[in-house]
Image: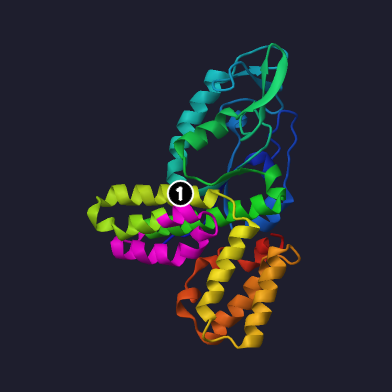
Amino acid sequence: MDSSIKVGVSSCLLGEEVRYDGGHKHDRYITDILGRFFAFVPVCPEVGCGMPVPREAMRLEGDPAQPRLVTNKTRIDRTDQMLSFCASTVRALEGEELCGFIFKKGSPSSGLFRVKVYSDGMPARSGSGLFAAAVVRHFPRLPVEEEGRLHDPAIRENFIERVFCYRRWKDFLRDEPDLGRLVTFHTRHKLLILSHSTGIYREMGSLVAHGNGMAWPALVLIYEEQLMKALAMHATVRKHTNVLMHIMGYFKRELSPPEKAELLGVITEYHDRLVPLVVPLTLLKHYVRKYGQQYLQQQYYLSPHPAELMLRNHV
């Protein structure tokens, strides 16, 4: 089974010289760090729809909900050309099994958030690039982010966690899924979901528990929607602390009084933002191994992504 983690990315972020001025916006974190774990599918909408390099700069104008793509000086409207590319490309991307997409911030084609849209010559950061908007519409549950926001440790950890989880979900769907296997998948992700949303955690538990009464396609679709909706909600220090204390409860009979005091002290230090999340997790994983706690050994919360990425060293 091909379980490669494919992530779409704006071509210029990989160092390709496709920008309007003939340059690039090479992001070393994407290529040098994430590139060790992801297989990138590069897309440059401008070049893809037939525009040259270099080319005249463009901007979005008009209604932020349905903006036009217009060249800055010659005032040529490139909207239909770009939208035609968007429609064909999102269909083609269905075959790539994407698990995420990283867009170039501020781009009139690929910016995801707060892209400038001009009205009467005045810009407002209120739009999305035409291609980015098309991808989000076509793949509503796909993890998406901008490269600039990935410098924020919490946003970076959240995005990458979702990418790895989406890959696991796709693997589940490809491996003769049934209700029993869905229960197993859900069980292994319980604490991860709980660290994002207690409300959706309860809803998903009820959904799986009553799965026998639903048509399988509807059950799978609703589960996927709730899973990705939950994970898109950021895990906070408070939420993580609740999960850490929940995990500690599994050892109430095994831990000695000094061990309990040490673990509680480390969790408290994390809660007070004196140490990063990796510190209490390292101690908890030690106890999981020491006492052979099988339920916790299966929990993706303890290792949702490769340790080499060091994502929980900074949250």
Name which quarter of the figure residue 49 lies in. top right
Q: Which residues are magenta?
A: 174-202
Taking depth in this image into account, of 167 and 23 the one nearest to the observer is: 167
Task: Check residue 233 for magenta coloring.
Answer: no
Q: Position of residue 305 (x, y in %)?
A: 58, 63
Query: 10 Å neighbourhood of mark 1: few (<14), some, or many (≥20)?
Result: some
Taking depth in this image into account, of 174 and 89 the one nearest to the observer is: 174
Q: Which secondary structure dominates the residues rendered in magenta?
A: helix
Q: Position of residue 165 (x, y in %)?
A: 50, 57
> Taking 195 as reference, is 258 above or below it?
below
User: Residue at coordinates 70% horizontally, 54% vertically from top-left?
Assistant: 153
Q: Position of residue 17 (x, y in %)?
A: 71, 37
Q: Position of residue 4 (x, y in %)?
A: 50, 58
User: Residue at coordinates 43% horizontally, 36% vertically from top-left?
Assistant: 91
Q: Is residue 98 visible?
A: no
Secondary structure of the residue carrying tag 1 is: loop
**Left of 89 or right of it: where is 69?**
right
* Quadrant in which the C terminus is drawn: bottom right
Q: Can you identify the residue that label 1 sits on? A: 97
> Taking 71 as reference, is 161 above or below it?
below
> Taking 2 as reference, is 268 above or below it?
below
User: Residue at coordinates 40% horizontally, 63% vertically from top-left?
Assistant: 185
Name which quarter of the figure residue 69 lies in. top right
**Left of 19 or right of it: where is 295?**
left
Count the numbered circles shown: 1
Taking depth in this image into account, of 103 and 278 the one nearest to the observer is: 278
Task: Check residue 184 for magenta coloring.
Answer: yes
Q: Is residue 106 visible?
A: yes
The three-letter code of the residue at mark 1 reads Glu
